[in-house]
Image (cartoon, helix red, strand yellow):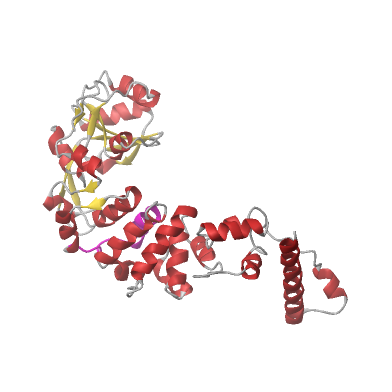
Amino acid sequence: MQISKIDLKNNSDLVFIANFLKPYTQRAYLVGGSVRDILLGLELFDYDIEIYDIDVKQFDAIMQKLGAKGFGKSFFVYKFKNFDLALARTENKISYGHTGFEVKICNDEKLGAKRRDFTINALMINIFSGEFLDFYNGLQDLKDGILRHIDEQSFQEDSLRILRAIVFASRFDFTIANETLNLMRNMDIKDLSKDRINTELYKFFKSLKLEVGYKYLQELHLEKEIFNFESDFKSLEFQNLLKEARKIIKDEALFLYLYLNFFKLDKEVFFKKAKLKKEYLKKANQAFYLNNVNDFELAKIAFDMPLKEWLGLWNEKRVKQAKKLKLYENKFESKIVTQDLINIGFFGKALGEKLQELKENELKEYIENIKRE
């Protein structure tokens, strides 16, 4: 599979940047995930541009003229609208931690591409000529759905790449190459902060193939490292549940809702240690039924939300059940008036218990009426 040129002229954003940079260089490339996503037919929201033949001072002046802001000046990166513009560079690990790199300007495209994590992210398109560069056979790996590292040493120097691999695998349903997986098995993520780990987890939670990412978390023994828990023989059953549920539920809280409830973990303790978004905890506390859920149990959930918002509505059977109850789009609206109970002497705990009793009786009657229709 070979491509020599890719026409970018139908993209007005890229045409604008190309026209702006044209007086200063003829070597500026769309790189990284931007090229990957174009080839996968995905819509582009952000652009990574790598620039050659401009020195640091001149680049700074050009970026100021553009109105771009220094986003990572030590890495020669500027941000303008939805563009990341950077001088081509090499990175050399000199100290512990994710930021412990020495950065130098690079003037060779193949060397510049070498610092990338995976072959599928090392593809380049010249924004002036459309010339397509693929030094590490990334196009074939993209076609085959393979995640493969470029350089063994540089890959091992950045432990964040372990998590990035898992995110890409679960996002695109890709297989991690055996040689890359073997490298990852001998790396650890102890040098990463919670914030760095959680940033990648949030991407994983949004992915379409949660079961793929979870499988790699287990295979690399990262489940214990990240979640402070290691699942048992039920993990295959859980993978199947993830696969089934994701077909229906797109909410990014789905993984944690299923994970914490399926394995019956203490949610408060988990969130205290994981330091994840509190809104996930609220959703994880929604009602959970692993097997069948009867009409009354399902309808009770509709006291709080339309059933289409319930993360447990993960298969077509439950969806049909919710629609039959006419509670899919709208929550159940009780006609019980709390003030009426207060007026006849209920208060405190007794008020809450009586209110719940009356609402449940009302719900049972509603279900019977639906069945008679």
Measured along the vertical axis of the image, is residue 117 above or below residue 26? Answer: below
Going by the picture, which residue comes out furthest to the right?
344
Please identify the residue farthest to the front as the structure is shown. Answer: 372
Q: Which residues are magenta?
A: 187-203
Q: Specify the farthest residue to the bottom.
A: 350
Report whether 196 appears left or right of 282: left
Q: Quadrant of the N terminus?
A: top left
User: Where does residue 298 sit, x and y in percent of width and height?
Assistant: 62, 66
330 magenta-colored: no
Q: Position of residue 85 (x, y in %)?
A: 30, 34
Residue drawn where x is 56% and y is 61% of the image:
318
Indicate the position of residue 235 as horizontal and vertical percent values. 34, 69
Q: Nearer the viewer, residue 164 or 189?
A: 164
Residue 105 can be seen, yes or no: no
Where residue 16 sits: x, y (%)? 36, 22
Q: Nearer the viewer, residue 160 or 206?
A: 206
Say left or right for 120 vs 346. left
Q: Quadrant of residue 159?
A: bottom left
Is residue 220 shown above or below 346? above
Q: Total marks drawn?
A: 0
Q: Residue at x 17, y 34 (%)?
A: 134
Q: Residue at x 41, y 33 (%)?
A: 81
* Left or right, 210 with reference to 328: left
